[in-house]
Image (spheres, rainbow, N blue to C red):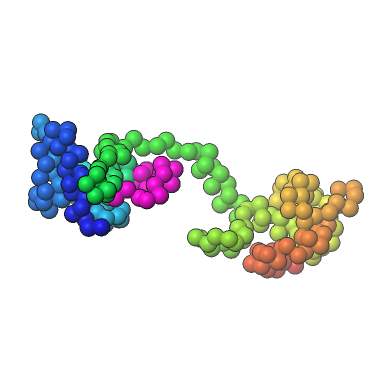
Amino acid sequence: MKEYELFEPVRSLFEQEGYKVNAEVKDCDITAVKDGRLIIVELKRSLSVSLLSQALRRQKTGAEVYIAVPKPKRYSPKTFRDTLYVIKKLELGLIFVKLLDEHSYAEIVHEPEEFVPVSTNYKKRREIMREIGGRHAADTNTGGVTGRRIATAFTEKCVQLACILIEQGPLTPKQLRSMGADENCSGILYRNSYGWFDRLGNGIYAVNEKGRTEINNYPELYEYYSSHSCHI
């Protein structure tokens, strides 16, 4: 597929709406004019940062700018949603071209329009800040990695509790708090989300075999809190 094959369907699209269409005007792939309205279309075989950058430069002319690319073979609004969001935020238009020999056609997916900024999601922001504030050890996660256990602030609290209990033996939540454990350690131990702790009676807790085994999945946290618990 050649880039110039996109031209005819796009030209036909605008000519049907009464526009005067020209090609290669001052480095613009396509221009379309009607009643003083100027439209510029940039053609490319695929979406890229280079194409978006080129289209943004065309906006300096005061024109409405579209990018035109072949319609993805496995296109669906859901999978394309994030890409379209970027295009909308850049205030660009999007045209898909379907190449079918003499039956090729172009369709406008999104028209250029002023982008309305989304309101701040304060709940999400608070959750992020709370999670950051709850992490005290050196960050043991690696950004961009999938398929690995993520050490959250909650995980860190559980590892800290386990390290103290392994070092000091069974303790009550009050004793654990006096040794630097989280203020909500009683709730963490009671819910026992990871299944690491056993209640021995009278509010005394210990680490079970599952906990002793699974904290090894977080070696950096284990090492950090083991070294700290030794000095309590």
Q: Residue 165: in sight, yes or no?
A: no
Q: Find out whether residue 80 is within the magenta segment.
A: yes
Judged from this view, the residue extending furthest toward the front is: 102
Q: In the rendered view of the protein, which quadrant contains the C terminus?
A: bottom right
Horizontal relation, residue 217 to residue 14: left or right: right
Q: Residue at x 22, y 47 (%)?
A: 102
Judged from this view, the residue extending furthest toward the top is: 35
Q: What stretch is highlighted in magenta?
A: 70-86
Horizontal relation, residue 195 to residue 94: left or right: right
Residue 40 percent coordinates (x, y) = 17, 44
Residue 28 percent coordinates (x, y) = 14, 50
Q: Residue at x 77, y 64 (%)?
A: 212
Horizontal relation, residue 149 to residue 56: left or right: right
Residue 58 percent coordinates (x, y) = 18, 48
Q: Residue at x 42, y 35 (%)?
A: 119
Q: Residue at x 14, y 37 (%)?
A: 15
Horizontal relation, residue 180 to residue 141: left or right: right
Q: Find out whether residue 156 is within the magenta segment.
A: no
Nearest to the observer: residue 117 or residue 8: 8
Q: Residue 143: in sight, yes or no?
A: yes
Residue 5 percent coordinates (x, y) = 20, 53
